[in-house]
Image: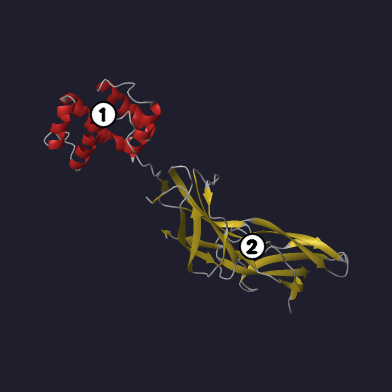
Amino acid sequence: MPQFSPGETRTAVAPITAKPSGISCEAELFLGPNDATKVASSGRIPFVSAGAAKNVSLPITMPSAPGSYHGYIDVLAEGLRFLTYILKEDVVIVSEVVFTPPPELTGILLQAYLLVEELYVAMEGDYSNWGRDLPQFKELESLISYGDAVRQISYRIQWPSLPDAEAVYNECWLAWQRDLQLYGYMTYDTAMLFATYMYQ
Amino acid sequence: MERLKVKMDDPILPPGAAKTATVPVTAKPAGMACEVELFLGPNDTTKVATSGRKPFTSTGALQNVTCPVTMPTNGGSAYHVYIDVYTGGYKFIAGIATEDVVIPGGSIGPIDWA
C-alpha cells in the first residue's frame, strides 16, 4: 500500500489505452472516500489517444489529513467519461509525528514503554509466550509486576489491529495507566500524541 | 449514387446510448410517402447500428425527420454515419455525415508512482 506524507506532490504514471486513436482526451486522478468526493485531484490532464497503451503522467498533491484514501482515475473525451478505474491499493497518508517524550512522561512509565517497544521488536513476531524468555521482559518485570509486564506486551501486540489512535488510547493506554496506578498522570492530549506515535 | 455530405456535430457518444438524430431532409415533390434510415458502420453495406426505416411524408421543402439509434455497445471505434431516403422502396437520396460517430473505449492499467 503506497504511503505518502501530507501535502507531498507525487506523480502517478497510468498506462491508458484509449480508442480509437486521435481523439482529444483528458485523464484525472483523484483521491477520496468515494468517487463523488475529491479530497485531492490532479485536475484534468489532456492527452491524445493512441489507440494503444500510452503512459499518462498525473501529478497530484497528497491530502493534508492523514488517513487512507481510495484512488480513482477517470478518462473523458469531450466531457464524456468513458473509462473509470479504481486503484487496486489505497493511498495512505502518514503523519510525520516526531515524538518527544513530554515532561510529564518520565520515570517508570517512559522506561516501561521503551522496554515494551524493545521487547515487541525482539519477539520478532513470535507471541507464543509474550517474550518472557527475553532479557527485556526480565527488565520490564523489574520495573512493573510480572502480571503487568505480560499485560503490557499483550496490549502492544494488539495495537496494530486497532483501527486508530483513539482505539489504542482507549484499549491500551487507559488500561496501562490503571495498571500502573498512574491514571491522570498525563493529559488526554499527551496520551493521544503518544498513542498516535505508537500506532505508527 | 454519390453520397451527399451532411454536417454533423457532437460526434462522441457513450456505448449503448439511445440517441435521436434529427435529420434535415428535403424531398421533392411534396406529398410522397418516404422513409429515411440512419445507420452507423464502417461502410455503407455494413450496418452496425440503425434506426430502421422511419416513414415520413415529403413536404417539398426542408423538414426535420427524427431517427432514434442505439449506439454500438463495443467502445473503441469510430463509425461513419449514413442516411438513406427511400420512396416506393427506391433509394433516391444518400448522405454521409461530415464527421464520424466516435464510441470511445479502452482500459487503464495498474499505475506506478514516480
Report how far apart the C-alphas of labels 2 and 1 lie in the structure. 67 Å
Q: Is residue A178 above or below residue A2?
A: above
- Residue A135 point in image, percent of width and height: 12, 37
Few, some or many residues within 10 Å of mark 2 (<14, 14–19, 20+): some
Q: Residue at x 35, y 27 (%)?
A: A170
- Residue A29 point in image, percent of width and height: 51, 54
- Residue A188 point in image, percent of width and height: 39, 26
Badge nearest the viewer, 2 or 1: 1
Q: Residue at x 30, y 35 (%)?
A: A159
Q: Name the mark on residue A154.
A: none
How many discs appear?
Answer: 2
Q: Which one is in front, A168 or A35? A: A168
Task: Answer with left or right where residue A52 lies relative to residue A135.
Answer: right
The amino acid type found where label 1 is placed reads Leu
Instruction: Look at the numbered disc 1 and give the secondary structure of its residue.
Output: helix
Q: Which one is in front, A1 or A121? A: A121
Q: Quadrant of the C terminus of chain A?
A: top left
Label 2 resides on the chain identified as: B
The amino acid type found where label 2 is placed reads Ile
Q: To which residue does mark 2 refer?
A: B12
The image quarter in which residue B91 lies: bottom right
Instruction: Look at the numbered disc 2 and give the secondary structure of its residue.
Output: loop
Q: Is residue B20 above or below residue A175?
A: below
The residue positioned farthest toward the left in the image shown? A133
Few, some or many residues within 10 Å of mark 1 (<14, 14–19, 20+): some
The image quarter in which residue B113 lies: bottom left
